[in-house]
Image (spheres, grey):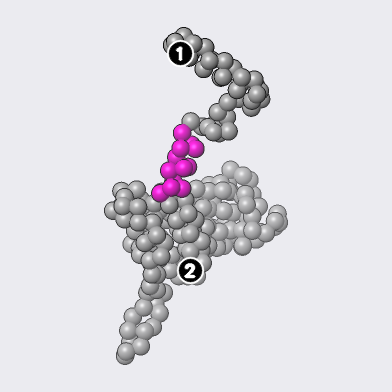
C-alpha cells in the first residue's frame, strides 16, 4: 500500500471516529479530563501503591490518634486538652517520617467570612507551631489551610465549640525519603505504632 493511501485511510478513520463521538464529547475528553497529564499521573500513583497507601494511612492516623482539637470562642489559644492531643499527634507523626500532613483550621458560624478565615488560619498555624515544638519537621507540614466557616460539624449560627477546631490529616509522602523512593509503601502502612511509655519499677506507664 502506498504512503498516500495509508494517510488517506488514517484520515478517514479519524473523521469517522470524530463523527461518532460528536462535538459535545470530543475525542480525548474522557481520557484527559480537561487537565493534560492528570490521568497518567493518577495511573502512576495507583500502580506504585501511593493512592491506596495514602488512604490507608489517613484512616490509620484518624483511628489511632485524635486528629482534632477545639478552641474557645474567638481564640487560637491551645488549652491543656489541645496540647495533650497534639503531643500524641506529634509522637505518631515522628514515627512515620515518610509522611506529610496538613492542618485545616475551622471556625463556627459567628462573625464575618473574612474574620473567620483569618481566625481559622491562626488556629491552624498555632497547631503547626506546637507540632514543630514537639519534634515534627516543619517541612512535613506542607500546607496550613483554613476552611474558614465552611464544613461545620454542627449546623448552627450560634457559638459552637465543636465547630471551632483544627483537623490534622495525612496528605502524602516525602518523595525523597529512601523508603518512598524504593516504593516500600506497604512497609510504611503496616509499621508498628508504639505509644510513648516509660518503665517505672518494671511496669510500663503511658506518658502524654
Judge left or right: residue 133 versus residue 84.
left
Near-viewer residue (83 or 189): 189
Q: CA distance from mark 2 to mark 1?
A: 67 Å
Badge 2: how crowded within 10 Å, few (<14), some, or many (20+)?
A: few
The secondary element bearing badge 1 is classed as loop
Indicate the quadrant containing the C terminus: top left, top right, bottom left or bottom right.
bottom left
Majority SS type along the magenta span: helix
- In the rendered image, is residue 132 in sight? no
Q: Position of residue 21 (x, y in %)?
A: 64, 25
Q: Residue at x 46, y 48 (%)?
A: 46
Q: Residue furthest left?
A: 178
- Badge 2 vs badge 1, beta-carbon distance below 8 Å: no
Which numbered disc covers residue 1?
1
Near-viewer residue (105 or 14): 14
Q: Is residue 83 magenta?
A: no
Near-viewer residue (146 or 11): 11
- In the rendered image, is residue 203 in sight? yes
Judge left or right: residue 45 versus residue 201.
right
Residue located beneath label 2 in the image: 64
Q: Residue at x 64, y 55 (%)?
A: 152
Badge 1: how crowded within 10 Å, few (<14), some, or many (20+)?
A: few
Q: Residue at x 48, y 14 (%)?
A: 6
Looking at the rendering, which quadrant does residue 164 occupy?
A: bottom right
Q: Residue at x 52, y 12 (%)?
A: 8
Residue bounds of the magenta highlight:
37-48
Judge left or right: residue 119 versus residue 175.
right
Ranked by sequence position, the earlier of labels 2 and 1 is: 1
Q: Residue furthest bottom?
A: 201
113 versus 26 height, above or below: below
Looking at the rendering, which quadrant does residue 134 occupy?
A: bottom left
62 versus 150 height, above or below: below
Amino acid at each position: 500500500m502506498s504512503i498516500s493511501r495509508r494517510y488517506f485511510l488514517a484520515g478517514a478513520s479519524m473523521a469517522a471516529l470524530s463523527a461518532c463521538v460528536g462535538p459535545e464529547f470530543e475525542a480525548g475528553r474522557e481520557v484527559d479530563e480537561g487537565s493534560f497529564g492528570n490521568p497518567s499521573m493518577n495511573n502512576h500513583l495507583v500502580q506504585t501503591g501511593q493512592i491506596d497507601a495514602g488512604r490507608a494511612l489517613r484512616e490509620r492516623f484518624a483511628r489511632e490518634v485524635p486528629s482534632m482539637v477545639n478552641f474557645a470562642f474567638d481564640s487560637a489559644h491551645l488549652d491543656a486538652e489541645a496540647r495533650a492531643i497534639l503531643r500524641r499527634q506529634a509522637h505518631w507523626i515522628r514515627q512515620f517520617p515518610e509522611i506529610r500532613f496538613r492542618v485545616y483550621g475551622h471556625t463556627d458560624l459567628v462573625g464575618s467570612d473574612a474574620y473567620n478565615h483569618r481566625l481559622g488560619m491562626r488556629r491552624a498555624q498555632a497547631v503547626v507551631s506546637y507540632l514543630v515544638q514537639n519534634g515534627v519537621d516543619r517541612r512535613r507540614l506542607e500546607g496550613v489551610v483554613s476552611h474558614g466557616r465552611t464544613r461545620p460539624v454542627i449546623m448552627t449560627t450560634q457559638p459552637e465549640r465543636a465547630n471551632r477546631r483544627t483537623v490534622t490529616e495525612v496528605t502524602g509522602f516525602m518523595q525523597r525519603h529512601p523508603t518512598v523512593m524504593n516504593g516500600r509503601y506497604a512497609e510504611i502502612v503496616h509499621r508498628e505504632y508504639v505509644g510513648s511509655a516509660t518503665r517505672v519499677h518494671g511496669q510500663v506507664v503511658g506518658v502524654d
